[in-house]
Image (spheres, helix red, strand yellow):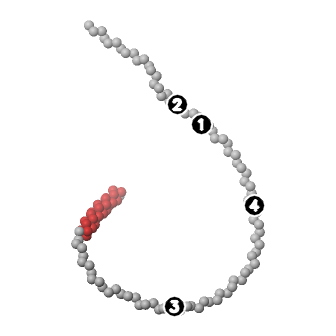
Amino acid sequence: MASFKCFIFAAFWIALSFSSMDVGLAARHLQQLPTIPSVPNLPKPSLPPLPSGVPTLPQPTLPTNPSLPQPALPSLPGLPSVPRVALPPLPSFPSIPTIPITIPSIPIPFLSPPPGN
């Protein structure tokens, strides 16, 4: 089933790449067209003139908002104090051992060559 989906995806990708090539070629052909002669001046449509006097609409009278007495709000109780928690100290990590950088010089015994007869 997964290989079928991969096949469909690959076919779609190939079709998309070929279609973009056609679009690129069409754009190139459009750029190579000769210039089109200009159109003679045509009369432009005009809008009718707006009326000079705009009538004013009557303004309605709005009733005044009666002021209502505000009820007294009770005072809010304070927040209780939260006790502080002391955390234990973090454990100390062991130190990382260091690796010696210098190579000790060890005498390497060389074998003597065999006697030549």
Q: Mark 3: which secondary structure?
A: loop
Structural crowding at the residue carrying mark 3, measured as other residues with C-alpha within 10 Å and reported as few (<14), some (14–19) or many (≥20)? few
Disc 1 to disc 2, C-alpha distance: 15 Å
Q: Do the numbered discs 4 and 2 sit on residues whose CB atoms are within 8 Å?
A: no
Q: Mark 2: which secondary structure?
A: loop
Disc 4 to disc 2, C-alpha distance: 58 Å
Q: Do the numbered discs 2 and 3 sit on residues whose CB atoms are within 8 Å?
A: no
Of mark 2 and mark 3, the one earlier in the sequence is: 3
Q: Mark 1: which secondary structure?
A: loop
Residue drawn at point x = 66 percent, y = 41 percent: 89
Q: What's under tag 4, amino acid-wise?
A: Gly
Which disc number belongs to residue 98? 2
Residue drawn at point x = 34 percent, y = 59 percent: 5
Of mark 3 and mark 4, the one earlier in the sequence is: 3
Mark whose residue sits in front, 1 or 2: 2
Q: In which quarter of the image is the N terminus?
A: bottom left
Number of disc labels: 4
Of mark 3 and mark 1, the one earlier in the sequence is: 3
Q: Dividing the picture into quarters, in which one does residue 12 lie?
A: bottom left
Confirm whether residue 4 shows in the render: no
Q: Do the numbered discs 4 and 1 sit on residues whose CB atoms are within 8 Å?
A: no
Which residue is label 3 attached to? Answer: 54
Mark whose residue sits in front, 3 or 1: 3
Q: What's under tag 2, amino acid-wise?
A: Thr
Disc 3 to disc 4, C-alpha distance: 62 Å
| 59 or 65: nearer the viewer | 59
Which residue is label 4 attached to? Answer: 78
Structural crowding at the residue carrying mark 2, measured as other residues with C-alpha within 10 Å and reported as few (<14), some (14–19) or many (≥20)? few
Which residue is label 1 attached to? Answer: 93
Q: What's under tag 3, amino acid-wise?
A: Val
